[in-house]
Image: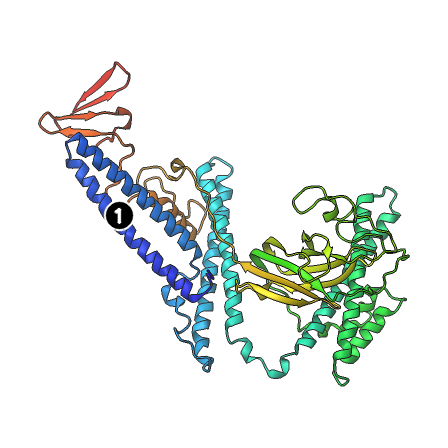
Amino acid sequence: LDFSDTSVQQMLEEKKDQIRREIHKELKIKEGTENLRKVTTDKKQLANVENLLKSSAKKIEQLHQQLQELDAHIVVKDADDLLDEPKSPDTGRRDTGSAPMNSRLGALEKQLNIEMKVKQGAENMIQMYSNGASKDRKMLVTAQQMLQDSKTKIEIIRMHILKATQESGLSADAKPEDSISPLELRIEELRHHLRIESAVAEGAKNVVRQLSAAKAKDKKLLTEAQTELQESSQKMDLLQLSLERRLSELPEEHPKRFAIQKELSVMASPILSPRHSFISLGDSLTHQYTNISKPAALTGTLEVRLMGCQELLENVPSRSKSSPTTIVNSSPGENKSSFIARRSMYGRPSSARYSLKPDEISNEICACLKLDNAVVGQTAWKTCGKQAWDQKFTIELDRSRELEISVYWRDWRSLCAVKFLRLEDFLDNQRHGMCLYLEPQGMLFAEVTFFNPVIERKPRLQRQRRVFMKQKGKTFLRAPQMNINIPTWSRLMKRALPSMSAPGTPSTPIGTANTAVTPSSGTLTVNDPTKLPLPSSPQPGFVLCLCCHEFDVLCFFL
């Protein structure tokens, strides 16, 4: 289910109201059962009443758990805010839906502020109950769970705000001249990533220079820096080649054509390093990147299925069999210094090395997945084709922004294609079957699906559910005493109160002892004295018997 959908949110609200009605009904049944227990004198009937009371209390507890889990997925609390779209929207009237959409955004932002306060209050509770004289393990566990739920819900609301913004008509107000064509957007993305890779390469080059000049050399760190420098340099070669090809597709009179040509000529100059080549262009290039906005950060689960590739680049630029800067079999899985070479994705050692002569050409390829420049997956080596791999990867996202897919030849050509995906493009929770155009050439067949984060609670023992003492509120700490705000305190009350009855309803006595009251004799008989429900006030003429030992009986005449 897409929990950001209005119809789904409305369905959740209806389900929430239904559970509330069931809880109210069960509380009435429980109240009647407790009244029946007070007047029942027959032991057999009393046992049946106790069983009914147990089942009723258990059902109420289950309904409260369902209510809490359901409440975690409801983003907007007010039911009126859920009706942000008409039942049958008219595509021809785009202006009529802008006001409801703005009201929905306002409701989402309001709920986000509430969750931020809850998060701050939970952090204060953790600090309060984790040390000092007020150390309380149960309250600490409750605060930690509340903090985790609040963090997850904050991410959900942020993504719902992003999706609502994308679906709103705010982008429709943009001027036609501000929009760019797909080719221009692809060129801007190439220039953006080319600038990033040049900075990474320059930084890796400085690290290699400093480590090489050091007296005590760290071989491991030096090898990693050299590998990073090589990967960035190879990636820059591909991006530069792709930018040259895209430039040839632009019209001769295009306003950005001259700036891109100047940029490529400066980068190709052997005098300046890639980093200095960008700096030498001055501030004129800085204004060229305004069309590329920073990707939004997503939290959740990303499912990626890679099937295969075709039409890959065979003659890779700046690669040769005798190149001193290229390591033989330096693609992922072959380089000992890389993450994938040391261990496979499941923690097992990698298989035997692939035997290939330096001057041979291989037709096997593999793909490497990077999430914000961190390796998260790698396919097996397979022959190039549409169905080469057909492998699925499940990636956990934590404020992640971009997914990079790199394709390698299993020979000295190494990296031959790359693709960058903005994660915010998959926010609709739908499966996207795509044919991705790689840089500088080639097609990648893949499926990408994003899933929203889900609030999950581990089942706990029944005895751990009661957080507060059973003095009916006498020992409850108020919000100022706990150094938290009102939203956090009210949510804490909701977590603690399900095990108790509603106001005005007699509470369930602790224990399940069978008791019988005989008014004629004025004697209260208890089968299990250790679970005796003490009366609120002694009645004259009753005898209260307590069994303290197997052969000792202590009697109080009241």
542 above or below 486?
above
Note whether 439 is above or below 322 in the view shown.
below
Q: How many marks?
A: 1
x, y (%) of residue 174? 58, 79
Report the amino acid beneath label 1.
Glu
Question: Where's the C terminus, which quadrant?
Answer: top left
x and y percentages locating residue 354 in the rendered image: 79, 48
Can the viewer see residue 241? yes
Q: Nearer the viewer, residue 306 or 424?
A: 306
Measuring 87% from the left and 66% from the top, which residue is drawn there? 272
Q: Quadrant of residue 418?
A: bottom right
Along the horizontal axis of the image, is 84 left or right of 365? left
Q: Secondary structure at mark 1?
A: helix
- 513 displayed left or right of 207: left
> Is residue 538 visible to us here?
no
Residue 473, position as x, y percentages in the image = 32, 42
The residue sitting at the top extreme is 551
Judging by the rendered image, the residue that carries numbered circle 1 is 26
Where is residue 235, by image quadrant? bottom right
529 to 293, vertically: above or below: above
